[in-house]
Amino acid sequence: MMITEAFANLAINSGAYDVLDTIYLTNQLRRLVGQDELSAITVADANLYTMIDTLTALAESNGQLTRLGWTKDMFEAALCDYLTPAPSVVNRKFAENYQLSPQQATAAFFKSSYENDYIKMRQIAKNRVFVHPSVYGDLTISINLSKPEKDPKEIAAVKQAPQTNFPTCQLCMENEGYLGRLNHPARSNHRIIRFTLDGEAWGFQYSPYAYYQEHAIYLNERHQPMVINGVAIRKILLIVEKFPHYFAGSNADLPIVGGSILTHEHFQGGGEKLPMSFAQTDKLVKLEKFKTLQAATLKWPMSVIRLISASIEELVAASSEILVAWDAYSDAAVDVLAHGLDGERHHTITPIARMRAGKFELDLVLRDNHTTSSFPDGVFHPHQDVQHIKKENIGLIEVMGLAILPARLKTELAAVKAYVSGQVTQLTDVAVYHQAWASELKLAYTGGDIDHYLNTALGRKFERVLEDAGVFKRDDQGQAAFARFLTKLSETSGIKQGKLNH
């Protein structure tokens, strides 16, 4: 099939164009690749990725990218913009599908978002993912290999690129249809669903480098900072009410325990049930003021209070009281510190909501971001002995039991494997920060499936990462401290700790 015909067919099938637009589309293709004569260029397989690769290579060989000052990503997004209906059309179709069901609306939007290569399915497939059985239930471990690394020339070019404040940030709605530049991702084929959330204008989109199935992002139309309070929790619950088949949650609003973007209010969610949603109840908590609300702590490495109710207002009221109490609570015996000497706030929560059996389920994960001379990165942050695996902030996704580990581990773990299995004998072949761990693993290794052995070891490291981030540890001292907080909570809000739930 001629490449012009294949390209036009993809654009028409996307719903962005009609058969009458065929000549226009083929001429737009000629403009993009910088070559008028395309009749001799054919493709045996007219799928999306063949098209992208063939046309990008052609444009590059024609010097078109250099002339335009575009990166490959910018060219590919501009190309795929022709496979994407206009925002008004996308929103109208979403609204029509939503009238049939929320699931149908999101399924169609998700499909269109990967069929136009906005969601980078090819790259996401490179991620290494496995399940790690733990005492808390199954955790999911992933090594993130999807985001392409910049080559030295690109890095140098970024440093020389002119600075601009548009778009304001990578989450702003200004990104919809934005060409991109050397130091800002290409978003020509990006579309955002508009909706009203608690009287405000919001958007719904998918993450291009998704960490889990149907990884959704909900963003405020206004560029304003993240704040965790009763208003934010209400918004999260309203999102779940609007999309009952998705969970929704927020990163914490403080450094160290928060996400990478704290300057733009947004939440995350999606269609996958992450490990924490399966966590077992640990202790029941009785809420005297909230008669129809159920509450419990969870058997989880981080400190979680789960609230269940059919009423959004009841959940907002109860969670607000818990947040206020936690904001002021300190316990020197377990190094929990609410405020610094200068009054700096150290406490917040990571909230996550979902629907289960017709009721709202709201998980409140207690967070503390204070530092000490012994733990300069954070007392409740991955400690030094696990930072060779993960030293970045523990955000919403990892709180829920999905490890997002750095790409460097792919080659580094291969070296650890070679050393532990005896393929190499020199410890110096292993990265310095892995050497102590590799020595321990080699000493304990008795043969058998080396990959399973190393996966288990890596999974246990992630367990430790989460345990380090937990404010009330799972040992007797930590659980006694958690009980003290719940007792203090009951004194101010009528919430009482219940009996163990076996």
Image (spheres, rainbow, N blue to C red):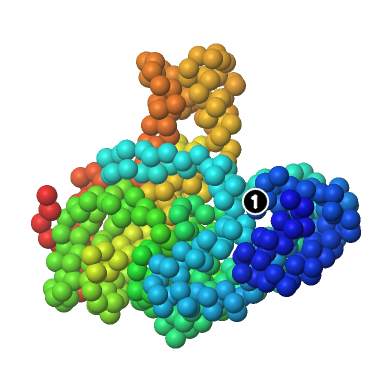
| Residue at the spot 77% in from the left edge and 57% down from the top edge | 4
Nearest the viewer among 403 and 241 is 241
Q: Is residue 379 visible?
A: no
Secondary structure under tag 1 reads loop
Q: Position of residue 465 (x, y in %)?
A: 41, 44
Mark 1, residue position: 47
In the image, taking residue 471 as reference, residue 297 lies left or right, namely left
| Residue at the spot 22% in from the left edge and 71% down from the top edge | 309
| Residue at the spot 38% in from the left edge and 49% down from the top edge | 401
Compared to residue 334, the image places residue 200 above or below, namely: below
Compared to residue 274, the image places residue 99 above or below, namely: below
Nearest the viewer among 117 and 293 is 117
User: Which residue type carries mark 1?
Assistant: Asn
Q: Is residue 121 visible?
A: yes
Q: Residues within 10 Å of mark 1 (few under 14, many from 20)?
A: few
Q: Position of residue 178 (x, y in %)?
A: 70, 69
Give the farthest residue toward the bottom.
Answer: 199
Q: Quadrant of residue 423?
A: top right
